[in-house]
């Protein structure tokens, strides 16, 4: 834990506020206004509302570091209890644990998933929550029409088939929603609380690689598909999700790109971006500034939901290409993509630090900064932040 890091103070006047009194009154100079945020799900659990309030509050002090699959596997290990490439380098777990839960939802069957991968994911989600970390989940769902994987974009009828009431694909997808609802209900921390999860469905929708992407769906179909999932979860009694949009922003974007195929303000809680811009700080800064602007206009917390350079080797990467651009951008988090297990080093698929990587020193320097939050730096993310109301 960083000894000099003070707890998050929330007494600063927020950038935006939607609270108004019934009439004019004298203003107390010491009075602190309340920021009112609104969740998609009005019946969200108290802990989910508290997490949402803290996603907005923490951006005033800095940003949370996260890593995809950090507790599940690393460069030289997998499925080890307590494992973490992040902790192995800096002595602390990340603040955000990101994980893919599609294998619970779409019913795929494989021995390693049934007996190892899924149980490990379930265990690590619970461990992350019990440590006070934030949990975020994406969904690389199989193609429910063709039987292929997420990258099977061979048909432009998938979304339409899901949305056709009573069709085989609709019935199958509804069973997947049942599975996701069952997972959400089963994930409880040591305190017995249902674990709040930031859910990223149908991410990178502006690209063509997925069956829900722009080569396979029309804009109205994509919006309807998103709403179908959100409405389906709420109808199934799921009230512990924070719904995050995360388009791919891999070049210099415009403001409208962040709301491309926007499901609606009442259907999105968190504004993310998957930002694979290599070592180009100009592109990254451009997109961060735009995301900050849209986030504040919509009064929704925002963050970098995926980033990284595959097989990177830059020694100063974390200070030069991550910490410097992120400073004062009012982002809640930044999450690097996964380090795949490859003990012999034959696989180039890694996006974050691990023991022995040339950027270890830069990573520890980033860790020591007062504007970066790791697990031990976090306030209680599941207790409502001061001066914030969540409806």
Image (cartoon, grey):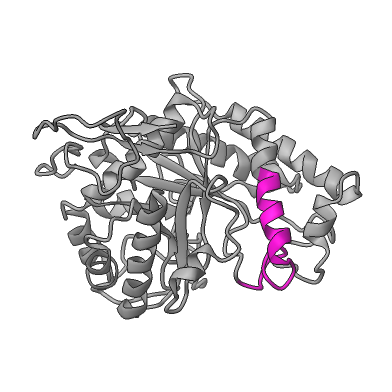
- From where the camera sits, is residue 340 visible? yes
**Which percent across, then down, holds residue 105?**
69, 43
| Magenta residues (range) | 207-229
Toward which corner of the image does residue 7 lie, by quadrant? top left
Task: Count up the numbered dots.
Answer: 0
Q: Is residue 131 found left or right of 196 in the rendered image?
A: left
Query: Which residue occupies 90% across, 44% down?
Result: 166
Q: Please, is residue 200 above or below residue 211 in the view?
A: above
Queried whether the magenta region covers residue 281, the answer comes back as: no
**Which percent across, then down, holds residue 356?**
31, 65
- From where the camera sits, is residue 373 visible? no
Queried whether the magenta region covers residue 221, the answer comes back as: yes
Q: Please, is residue 252 above or below residue 339 in the view?
A: below
Which residue is outermost to the front? 24
**Which percent across, then down, holds residue 214?**
67, 70
Q: Is residue 360 found left or right of 109 in the rendered image?
A: left
Query: Which residue occupies 24% across, 64% down?
Result: 323
**Which percent across, then down, holds residue 134?**
40, 41
* Screen quadrant of the N terminus: top left
Q: Is residue 8 found left or right of 312 in the rendered image?
A: left
Q: Nearer the viewer, residue 225 or 343?
A: 225
Query: Which residue occupies 40% across, 77% down?
Result: 278
Query: Which residue occupies 51% across, 73% down?
Result: 346
């Amino acid at each position: 834990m960083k000894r000099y890091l003070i707890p998050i103070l929330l007494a600063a006047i927020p950038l935006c506020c939607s609270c108004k009194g019934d009439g004019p009154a004298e203003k107390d100079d010491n009075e602190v206004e309340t920021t009112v945020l609104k969740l998609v799900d009005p019946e969200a659990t108290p802990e989910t509302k508290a997490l949402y309030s803290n996603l907005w509050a923490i951006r005033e002090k800095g940003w949370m570091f996260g890593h995809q699959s950090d507790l599940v596997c690393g460069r030289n290990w997998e499925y080890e209890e307590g494992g973490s490439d992040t902790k192995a380098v800096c002595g602390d777990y990340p603040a955000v644990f990101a994980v893919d839960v599609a294998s619970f939802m779409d019913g795929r069957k494989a021995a390693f998933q049934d007996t190892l991968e899924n149980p490990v994911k379930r265990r690590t989600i619970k461990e992350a929550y019990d440590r006070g970390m934030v949990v975020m989940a994406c969904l690389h769902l199989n193609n429910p029409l063709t039987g292929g994987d997420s990258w099977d974009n061979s048909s432009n009828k998938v979304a339409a088939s899901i949305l056709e009431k009573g069709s085989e694909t609709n019935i199958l997808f509804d069973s997947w929603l049942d599975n996701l609802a069952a997972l959400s209900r089963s994930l409880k921390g040591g305190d017995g609380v249902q674990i709040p999860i930031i859910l990223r469905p149908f991410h990178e929708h502006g690209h063509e690689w997925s069956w829900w992407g722009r080569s396979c769906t029309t804009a109205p179909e994509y919006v309807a598909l998103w709403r179908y999932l959100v409405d389906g979860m709420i109808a199934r009694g799921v009230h512990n999700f924070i719904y995050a949009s995360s388009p791919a922003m891999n070049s210099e974007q415009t403001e409208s790109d962040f709301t491309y195929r926007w499901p609606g303000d009442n259907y999105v809680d968190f504004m993310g971006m998957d930002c694979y811009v290599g070592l180009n700080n100009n592109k990254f800064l451009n997109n961060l500034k735009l995301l900050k602007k849209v986030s504040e206009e919509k009064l929704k917390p925002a963050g970098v939901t995926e980033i990284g350079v595959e097989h990177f080797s830059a020694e100063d990467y974390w200070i030069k290409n991550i910490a410097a651009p992120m400073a004062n951008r009012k982002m809640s988090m930044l999450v690097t993509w996964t380090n795949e297990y490859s003990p012999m080093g034959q696989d180039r698929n890694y996006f974050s630090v691990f023991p022995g990587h040339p950027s270890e020193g830069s990573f520890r320097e980033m860790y020591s900064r007062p504007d970066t939050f790791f697990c031990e730096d976090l306030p209680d993310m599941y207790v409502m932040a001061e001066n914030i109301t969540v409806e």
